[in-house]
Image (cartoon, helix red, strand yellow):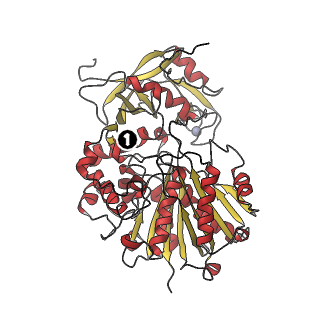
Amino acid sequence: MTREQTTPSYPPPTPTAVSAPFWEAAQERRLAYQRCADCAQAVFPPRAHCPHCWSESLTWQESTGHGTIASFTVAHRPGHPAFAELAPFVLALIDVQDGFRLLSRLTTNPEEGLAVSAPVRVVWESSGDWTLPLFELITVDGGP
Amino acid sequence: MSPAAIVGIGELAPQRYSSGATTLSMIARAALEATRDAGLAREDIDGLLVGPQVGETPQHVPATVAEYLGLHPTMANVVDLGGASGAGMAWRAAAAIQAGMCQTVLCVLGNINERGRVPRSPNRNPIREFDVPFGASGANTSYAFLAQRHLAEYGTTSAQLATAVVAQRENAQLNPKAVFHGTPLTVEEVLASPFVVEPLRLLEIVMPCAGAAAFIVTSAERARDLRHRPVLLSGAGEKVTHRAMSQAPSLTSGPLKAAIDSAYRQSGTGAQDMDLLQLYDCYSIVIALTLEDAGVCPVGESGPWMAENDLTWRGPKPLNTHGGQLSFGQADLAGGMSHIVEAVHQLRHEAGERQVADARTALVTGNGATLSEATALVLQREDS
Ligand SMILES: [Zn+2]
């Protein structure tokens, strides 16, 4: 038996019983997040309990997918070998308008405009069996 | 905090790669050295604090280490705070002694680092689920976010961040155990090293090594009967706030601020009292953030402050006189213990050529995960 040399595939998401609705929504290109029915705060990543008030009444909501960059890095030497060929790429912490922060990747390496506070919006990308929420810069005229 | 003291230290010189060693064997070498340094014997150790060892011993670490060393401790536990584990052990040892659970505690950390071995965590926690699939594996990206935010918010420059790295490298030239002993460094060389995760470059990022370190804690009263001048644990503080960088309460200040405040308060000291700063340094940016959280310089001004002050062993605010992990080497979790071991050398006035004149009080910090797990200690030379 021979073993072919292949590029390691991207590590897929690892949904749990609690987070599964996030990834199911992603398949439909909807950015889902939770909001606490008791204290009204946004909750991410998905939980069975609100970290702000310990309520178990969390409801799934659909995000606008718009936000701003809280910080970013251009990754030249990624930690996981599967991403080596993609480098350099931009990873960012994104403050989503709905009140939560997540980590994602930008779809392209912008030649200009990449900055803390720059506005971004979600762009869906298929990766194997999964659909991932990536982001792109919103340019001044509203589109790339 | 009931008076407790560090009475013995042991440390292997970090090696870039190990071969033929086990984690247990490295831990044992450091533990034996610390016990002998204290003038104690195996039978005197009745408390044991160890770190997690995901690879070799996933569970039951204290029992495994105790069995290896022939210890029968009456207090045994794992301290799982990443780079803060070493500092976290110090106050836990003192607390266990105060609680009457034991009298003399061995605190030990270490790990192998074999060439070609790529550790991959088998976890399924939120980081694995929501960071790794996007290309963010390991700590580098998290600290790059912190650095980028500091640059954007305060106008800090990479050259300023590099000055601390270079000062520590100068200190390491007087420490034969340092992995970069014999390899001086300039700011220009740091800035010429390749980007790993912008704005962080290769020489601003700690190098993984193999090694181990240990220290022994006992009551201040018992410490006075032992070989060395006791180094008192005068204050401690700890705070844990998050695991993933995306969940950090702040990108410009960490839980170390509260931990350091607690250590100052318990010891009745402040930033101005520190003769020595042994600050956890996995990345250049962590030094900058810790200087601000410690009140050594105003918030946002660590960049110019580092560039304007002499941070070497001979300056007014000596920083990481052993070289810091960036120049001494980071032997996994033992890297965070190197700051304590060096503080003990300095406060005993046994640091040789790099001795800080009349060092009496030191701030030691530990930092784990993504600026999430913080422990701070104030250590003091006991007056004669
Ligand atoms: Zn709530």
State the residue in front, A67 or B291: B291
- What quarter of the picture does the N terminus of chain B occupy? bottom right
- State whether residue B261 is above or below residue B356: above
In this orientation, which residue lies closer to the viewer: A62 or B314?
Answer: B314
Residue B105, position in %: x, y?
A: 66, 66
Residue plotted at (27% across, 65% down): B310
Q: In this view of the protein, which residue sits in the foreground, B81 or B336?
A: B336
Q: Is residue A1 left or right of residue B347?
A: right
Chain letter of mark 1 equals B
Furthest toward the front, the residue is B20
Query: Which percent across, then down, holds residue B103?
Result: 70, 72
- Can you give x and y, in whole percent of width and height, for residue B257 in the image? 45, 58
A139 relative position to A49: left or right: left
The residue sitting at the bottom extreme is B384
Marker count (numbered): 1
Give SS at disc 1.
helix
Which image quadrant is residue B178 in? bottom left
Inspect the image, locate mark 1, and give the three-letter code of the amino acid beneath it. Answer: Ala
From where the camera sits, is residue B375 visible? no
Q: Residue B357 is drawn in which quadrant?
A: bottom left
Quick check: which quadrant has ligand 1? top right
| A44 to B83, vertically: above or below | above
Q: Is residue A54 something one can see in this rendering?
A: yes
> Which percent across, then down, holds residue B16?
46, 47
Front residue of A96/B360: it is: B360
Q: Which residue is mark 1?
A: B144
Where, by quadrant of the figure, is residue B40 drawn?
bottom right
